[in-house]
Amino acid sequence: MLNSISPEDLFVAFGLDSARIGERPFVQRRLSDLRGCFADTAAYDAALAAEDPVLYEVTAVEPANGDGQLHYGLGILYPGKIGDEYFLTKGHYHSHRPAAEVYVGLKGEGAMLLEDEHSSESRMVPLRANSVVYVPGHTAHRTLNTGDTPLVYLGIYPSNAGHDYGAIADKNFRMTIVEQNGQPALRERVEGRG
Ligand code: F6R
Ligand code: MN
């Protein structure tokens, strides 16, 4: 097994500010890729008409596949809001529903929105430097930047987790995280409204 892992995957150095791993390719999501995710559709359309900024970037590292193996992603989510809702990731379930994930906050101030697949129970959990968020299996998860600097984090997950974006694209999350009196707050998401 050890021999089958490339030295580049055994030891990885990353930039804490850039959230890049050398020259490795990364996925970039712009505001236009997030259509349908934000509650305030008028504010979304107005923002997109003005510009199409990069909201986040993720470098995925997949050293090995198979039972017991791990993958991870280094993410950077930029600050901003659409209406009073913070910039956010698409969010997903894992295709293999029992797969859990650990998020490690590295820089900035953010929150994770967790939603139980069966009960739709929602939680807002802080994500910041020197902190770990445990995302149980069967839980939709989305990351939001609640600060005014880039949020940098690692997500570590089983190699067989897979990503199911379809369920979120259909139904979105029941709740969202908005700025209320200068603080992040969980609020019922009403389509078309903030
Ligand atoms: C992997 C994981 C993270 C996200 C990243 C971007 O399972 O949860 O690495 O992939 O935060 O969010 P999405 O994938 O929802 O666009
Ligand atoms: Mn995940």
Image (spheres, helix red, strand yellow):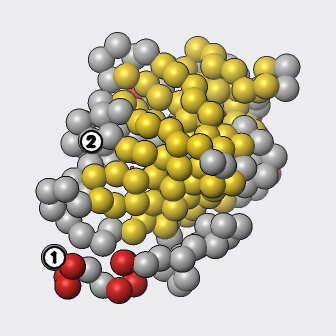
C-alpha distance separating marks 2 and 1: 22 Å
Q: Is residue 40 above or below residue 153?
A: above
Dot 1 surroundings within 10 Å: few (below 14), some, or many (20 or more)? few
Q: Nearer the viewer, residue 66 or 144?
A: 66
Question: At 53% across and 30% down in the image, what residue appears?
Answer: 113
Which quadrant would residue 111 be assigned to in this image?
A: top right
Residue 92 visible, this orientation? yes
Q: Which residue is mark 2?
A: 99
- The amino acid at mark 2 is Ala
| Nearer to the camera, 44 or 73 | 73
Q: Are marks 2 and 1 in contact (CB under 8 Å)?
A: no
Q: Quadrant of the N terminus?
A: bottom left
Q: Which residue is mark 1?
A: 1
The residue positioned 32% from the left and 40% from the top of the image is 100
State the residue at coordinates (42%, 65%).
60
| Quadrant of res 106 | bottom right
Q: Amino acid at mark 1?
A: Met
For residue 6, side relative to residue 20 (left or right): left
On the image, the x and y values in percent for residue 129 come to 66, 49
Dot placed on the residue nearer the N-terminal end, 2 or 1: 1
Q: Is residue 56 visible?
A: no
Question: Is 111 left, or right, of 61 in this rendering?
Answer: right
Q: Quadrant of the C terminus?
A: top right
Q: Determine the residue located farthest toward the right in the rendered image.
A: 181
Picture coordinates of residue 44 (x, y %)? Answer: 69, 38
Mark 2 residue crowding within 10 angstroms, few (<14) / some (14–19) / many (20+): some
The quarter of the displayed image where residue 159 is located? bottom left
Where residue 132 sits in the image (x, y, percent)? Answer: 53, 42
The response on whether ligand 2 sits within 8 Å of label 2 is yes
Badge 1 element: loop
| Residue in the picture at 54% in, 77% down | 13
